Image (cartoon, rainbow, N blue to C red):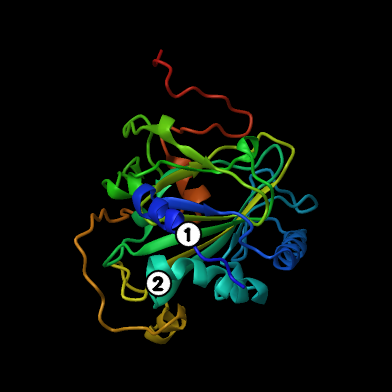
Amino acid sequence: MATKLSKTQMEQYNEEGFTLVESALPPNMLSEMLRLTDEVVEGASGLADDDDRYDLEETHTPDKPRVRRLKSPFEHWPFFNDFLRSPEVLDIIEPLMGPNIRLYNNKMNMKAPGYGAAVEWHQDWAFYPHTNDVGCAVGIYLDDVAEDNGPMMIIPRSHKGPIIDHNSKGFFCGAIDPIKSPLDYDSAIPLMGPAGTMTIHHVRTIHGSALNHSQKPRRLLLQGYFAADAWPIRGFRPGQTLDDFNALVVRGEPTLEPRLANVPVRMPYPEAPHQGSIYENQHILENRFFESVGEHKDITAEPA
């Protein structure tokens, strides 16, 4: 039987912009996801560069595959497509989303031991504003996650604030400059828990994650959902038809009547010069908050 959110968890999501569900995945489903993920990563052997399935670490080589993201795994491996439509996920988020739910995106971010890349502070909403903000990202930790292996970090109540500038050097980079936008980063809460833990955060919540300093992996499956009456302001993706759009409704029914809400919007333009995954886009960020491999940086230090 699928887990349900408690009243306390729903209040935390609404007030703080996130909540956490431990043991959300049955052990058999978790073990199968781990087995398949290992198999999928091994499939990156022989690749010299990114493709439509794999986003590779900068230290990747064809004989030593290092994957930092699986791109839209539901489009390539059926298990992930089945999972994002399963009651183990949808029964949990329906009280937050309503009865009609559309998938927006799906990926797996992977922080390998010792070198797993950081993700700078950002709001998902900055990438894809909709006609209303009834949207969330659901994460599943495939590994035990502690403070040293790069947990997702959330700035509580940030979903009730403005949409922060995510541009750098004149382009949208999908990251918040910590110098130009001095938020209360000290208030950030790391979302930690054993393998099988589910994270849920609001589409406007500011979040990020540090480099993996440990000898433990940190793999996080992420899938974004909106209420079916939330329509993307930028329109359909290139080549996407109405039938394709409606096929992403994973529960309930589609609608041709978008619900318009008074929500803050900052359009993600001009696009990054090298448009790609969040890792690629964030390369042009002028001031980084999190350190990268081989780099130790204190952003609070006075400039020389």
Q: Is residue 174 visible?
A: no
6 sits left or right of 59 in the view: left
> From mark 2 to mark 1, how far is it between C-alphas?
36 Å
Q: Secondary structure at mark 2?
A: loop
Instruction: Say which quadrant the C terminus sits in.
Output: top left
Residue 269 percent location from the top left of the image: 31, 54
Q: Which mark is residue 237?
A: 2
Q: Nearer the viewer, residue 270 or 123?
A: 123
Kind of residue indicated by mark 1 = Ser
Kind of residue indicated by mark 2 = Arg
| Vertical comparison of 283 with 302: above or below | below
Residue 209 percent location from the top left of the image: 53, 41
Label 2 or label 1, whichever lies nearer to me, is: 1
* Residue at which label 1 appears: 6
Residue 232 percent location from the top left of the image: 32, 69
Residue drawn at the location 62% of the way across and 58% of the way down: 50
| Vertical comparison of 62 with 175: above or below | below
Q: Are discs 2 and 1 less than 8 Å apart at CB?
A: no
Residue 240 percent location from the top left of the image: 42, 79
Residue drawn at the location 33% of the way across and 49% of the way down: 159
Mark 2 and mark 1 lie on one chain; the one further toward the N terminus is 1
Q: Is residue 170 visible?
A: yes
Q: Secondary structure at mark 1?
A: loop
Instruction: Say which quadrant the N terminus sits in.
Output: bottom right
